[in-house]
Image (cartoon, helix red, strand yellow):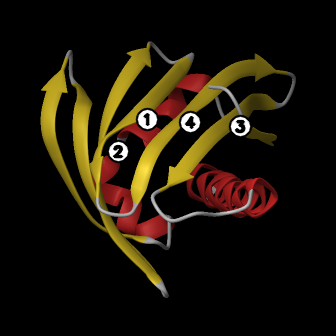
Amino acid sequence: MAEHTRSSITIAATPAEVMAVIADFAAYPAWTGEVKEVEVLESTEGRAAQVRLLLDAGAIRDEHVLAYTWDGDREVSWTLVKSQMLRSLDGSYALAAVKGGTEVTYQLAVDVKIPMLGMIKRKAEKVIIDRALAGLKKRVEG
């Protein structure tokens, strides 16, 4: 990932517990806010390999297909297969056991098909990351 945005949060749970929530795509509409519909298109070794997500964030409505790569309960990364509005979307959750739980680091790089200033893009990535980490923490700890 060339230009990307990254943020971390500590969640009071084991890496396996956190990764179980991340891997439960069917529950995403209940805790992510923007994700309205999810369909796992392909699975490998019990985890999603390709997922279709319908997102609705008010002014922005898009359907993505993402390809996922899993490294046990340590990391999951994804890359864009197709989208109407995005040129690319690369991201990852990296999980590390720490005192008091799991440190989750979310990294994201998005490129939209319409022209957009780099600093506006980074700000949008930061909002997406912060909202996702807060939702993940609430879901895991709740």
Q: Nearer the viewer, residue 138 or 82?
A: 82
Q: Determine whether label 1 and label 2 are within 8 Å by CB.
A: yes
Residue 71 place in picture, x, y as percent = 46, 12
Whole-Å distance between the Cαs marked 3 and 1?
25 Å
Dot 1 alpha-carbon crowd within 10 angstroms: few under 14, some 14 to 19, many 20 or more: some
Question: Mark on residue 18?
Answer: 4
Residue count near mark 3 (Cα–Cα under 10 Å), binned few <14, some 14–19, many ≥20: some
Residue sitting at x 21%, y 23%: 46
Q: Position of residue 64 (x, y in %)?
A: 30, 54
Distance of label 1 from label 2 (alpha carbons): 6 Å
Question: SS for tag 2?
Answer: loop
* Residue at screen point 38% across, 63% down: 85
| Residues tagged 3 and 2 counted as in contact (Cβ below 8 A) | no
Residue under the point 65% across and 24% down: 95
Spot occupied by residue 125 in the image (x, y as percentages of width and height)? 68, 55
Q: Using residue 18 as the reference point, say whether residue 40 is left or right of it.
A: left
In 3D space, how far apart are the residues under numbered discs 4 and 1 (Cα atoms)?
Answer: 5 Å
> In front of the other: label 4 or label 3?
3
The circle drawn on residue 4 is 3
Which residue is under mark 1? Answer: 20
Comparing marks 3 and 1, which lies closer to the viewer? 3
Which quarter shows the C terminus?
A: bottom right
Which residue is rendered at x = 54% and y = 49% of the image?
Answer: 111
Q: Amino acid at mark 1?
A: Ala
Decide: few, some or many residues near mark 2? Use Cα within 10 Å; few <14, some 14-19, many ≥20. few
Q: Nearer the viewer, mark 3 or mark 2?
A: 3
